[in-house]
Image (spheres, helix red, strand yellow):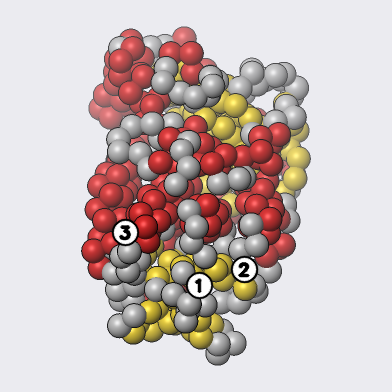
C-alpha cells in the first residue's frame, strides 16, 4: 500500500464519511477524505439546520472513535417517545384515545451506563465534533474538491478530482449522498421514487420543559415531530405536500408561526421560532448494490429514506461501523481490502438491514400519511395493541436504539 495515496479514499466528508474515516484510523488504517465543500463551511448553522435522532448504539461508536466527549454537551437525552394519531392538529391531543404508543427508557435493559432511548443533536454540532476529531487524528482532507470519476485497475481504485489530479488507493468509498458521482461511475443503478412531500424543519424555544420527551403525531398530511434539544429547545420536523412546503418556505414569519402552532398545540406553552426554516423534498433511493470493484457505498449514497422514523443517519453510521470492522479485520488477515471477497462480506452484512428498513419506512409513510377510514382504524388498533404488550414495546425500543441483530464492535462500544 506504500505506492498509494491512502489505504481508503472516502469521497464525502459529511457525518457518515467522517465517522468512517475516524473508525478506520482507530483500527490502524490510513484514510483520506475528499469533499466538494470547504471543510469549515459544514459548520455554519445555515449549511444544515436539521437535527438528528441518534441511536444509543450510534453514540457508542462516536465515543469509541474519539468524538463522543465533544458531542456530549450538545446531546439531549431522549427518555420517552410518545406516538399519537389523529385527524386534527394539536400534538398530544390523541392521549384521550387508545390510539397512542409510549416508549420509556426505563423499560429496556442491557444498555451501558443507563443509556437513554437515543439522543437529539443538531447536525452542525455533529459536524463540528467530527471535524475536530478528524483534525486531531491528522486525517488528511482535500477540500473543496469534487470527485469527478472513478477508474479501476487490477490493484487500485483511481479517483479523478475536479482539478485533474488522480489519487489511488486499494479501495474507494462513496459517502457523497444521494447524487453520488462514484456510484454512477461504477454503473450501480438505483430504484426510488418521490413522495410528493416536503419536510419542513425549524428550531423553536419552548416556554415549558420538554423533559426529554419526543413526540410524533400523525396527521393525514404526514407526521409532525417535536424532538427535544438542549437549552430548552426543540427541533420541529413535519411533512407537508410539496406545494404547501414551498408556500411555508416563503411565508411571512407570522403566517408560518400560525401554521406551526395549529400543529403544535399549547401543551408546552408559548413557542418561539429561533433560526432559519428549511424545506427538503422527501423521496426514497435504494442502490441496487452496495459494492462494485474496489468501491463501497455508505450512507445516503446507498440508501436515502423518509425521515418518518428518524433512522436515516443511523443507517449510514451502521454502514461505517460494519465497513470499518470488515476492512480492519481484512488487513490483519493479510487480505486485499479492495478485493471482491472482502467487499462482499460488508455487503452481505448490511444488505438485509438496509433493504428491510427502507421498505418498512416506505410502508409507514403510506399507512400513516392519509385519512383512509379503514387504514386509520387498523393503525389505531395496532398502536393500542403494541402499547399494551411490554415485550413488543421493548423490541421496538431496542430496534430504534440499534441494539438488535449482529452489531459491529463499534456499535457495542468496543474498539476495533
Does residue 170 appear left or right of residue 250 in this picture?
left
207 over 17 or under it: above or below: above
Q: How far, Cα to Cα, is label 3 from label 2?
A: 26 Å
Task: Say what secondary structure mark 3 lies in.
Answer: loop
Q: CA distance from mark 1 to mark 3?
A: 19 Å
Is 182 positioned to the left or the right of 186 in the image? right
Mark 1 or mark 3: whose residue is earlier in sequence: 1
Label of residue 134 in the image: none
- Above or below, 34 against 129 in this view is below
What percent of the width, then of the height, locates residue 310? 47, 39
- Which residue is labeled 2 in the image? 140
Question: In which quadrant of the rendered image does the N terminus lie?
Answer: bottom left
> Crowding near pointer 1: few (<14 within 10 Å), some, many (20+)?
many
Please tell me in which quadrant of the rendered image residue 162 appears.
bottom right
Q: CA distance from mark 2 to mark 1?
A: 9 Å
- Dot 3 and dot 2 residues touching (CB under 8 Å): no
Residue name at image x 40 percent, y 56 percent: 328
User: Is 68 or 361 nearer to us in this picture?
Assistant: 68
Label 1, on which residue?
6
Q: Earlier in the sequence, mark 2 or mark 1?
A: 1
Q: In which image quadrant can residue 41 be found? A: bottom right
Per the image, the residue denoted by label 3 is 333
Amino acid at each position: 500500500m506504500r505506492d498509494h495515496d491512502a489505504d481508503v479514499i472516502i469521497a464525502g466528508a459529511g457525518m457518515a464519511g467522517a465517522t468512517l474515516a475516524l473508525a478506520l484510523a482507530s483500527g490502524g488504517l490510513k484514510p483520506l477524505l475528499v469533499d466538494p465543500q470547504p471543510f469549515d463551511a459544514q459548520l455554519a448553522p445555515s449549511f444544515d439546520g436539521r437535527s438528528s435522532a441518534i441511536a444509543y448504539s450510534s453514540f457508542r461508536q462516536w465515543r469509541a472513535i474519539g468524538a463522543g466527549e465533544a458531542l456530549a454537551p450538545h446531546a439531549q437525552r431522549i427518555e420517552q417517545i410518545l406516538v399519537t394519531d389523529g385527524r386534527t392538529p394539536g400534538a398530544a391531543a390523541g392521549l384521550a384515545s387508545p390510539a397512542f404508543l409510549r416508549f420509556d427508557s426505563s423499560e429496556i435493559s442491557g444498555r451501558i451506563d443507563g443509556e437513554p432511548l437515543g439522543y437529539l443533536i443538531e447536525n452542525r454540532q455533529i459536524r463540528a465534533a467530527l471535524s475536530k476529531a478528524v483534525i486531531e487524528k491528522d486525517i488528511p482532507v482535500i477540500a473543496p474538491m469534487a470527485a469527478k470519476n472513478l477508474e479501476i485497475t487490477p490493484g487500485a481504485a483511481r479517483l479523478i478530482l475536479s482539478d485533474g489530479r488522480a489519487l489511488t488507493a486499494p479501495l474507494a468509498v462513496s459517502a457523497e449522498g444521494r447524487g453520488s458521482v462514484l456510484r454512477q461511475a461504477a454503473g450501480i443503478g438505483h430504484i426510488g421514487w418521490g413522495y410528493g412531500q416536503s419536510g419542513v424543519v425549524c428550531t423553536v424555544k419552548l416556554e415549558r420543559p420538554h423533559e426529554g420527551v419526543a413526540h410524533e403525531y400523525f396527521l393525514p398530511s404526514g407526521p409532525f415531530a417535536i424532538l427535544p434539544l438542549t437549552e430548552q429547545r426543540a427541533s420541529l420536523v413535519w411533512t407537508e405536500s410539496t406545494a404547501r412546503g414551498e408556500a411555508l418556505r416563503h411565508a411571512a414569519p407570522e403566517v408560518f408561526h400560525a401554521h406551526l402552532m395549529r400543529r403544535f398545540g399549547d401543551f408546552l406553552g408559548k413557542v418561539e421560532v429561533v433560526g432559519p426554516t428549511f424545506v427538503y423534498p422527501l423521496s426514497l433511493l435504494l442502490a441496487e448494490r452496495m459494492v462494485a470493484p474496489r468501491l463501497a457505498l455508505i450512507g445516503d449514497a446507498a440508501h436515502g429514506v423518509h425521515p418518518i422514523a428518524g433512522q436515516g443517519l443511523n443507517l449510514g453510521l451502521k454502514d461505517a461501523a460494519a465497513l470499518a470492522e470488515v476492512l480492519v479485520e481484512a488487513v490483519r488477515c493479510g487480505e486485499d481490502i479492495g478485493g471482491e471477497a472482502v467487499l462482499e462480506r460488508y455487503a452481505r452484512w448490511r444488505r438485509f438491514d438496509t433493504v428491510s428498513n427502507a421498505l418498512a419506512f416506505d410502508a409507514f409513510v403510506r399507512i400513516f400519511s392519509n385519512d383512509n377510514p379503514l387504514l386509520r382504524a387498523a393503525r389505531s388498533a395496532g398502536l393500542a395493541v403494541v402499547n399494551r404488550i411490554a415485550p413488543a414495546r421493548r423490541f421496538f425500543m431496542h430496534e430504534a436504539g440499534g441494539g438488535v441483530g449482529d452489531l459491529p464492535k463499534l456499535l457495542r462500544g468496543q474498539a476495533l
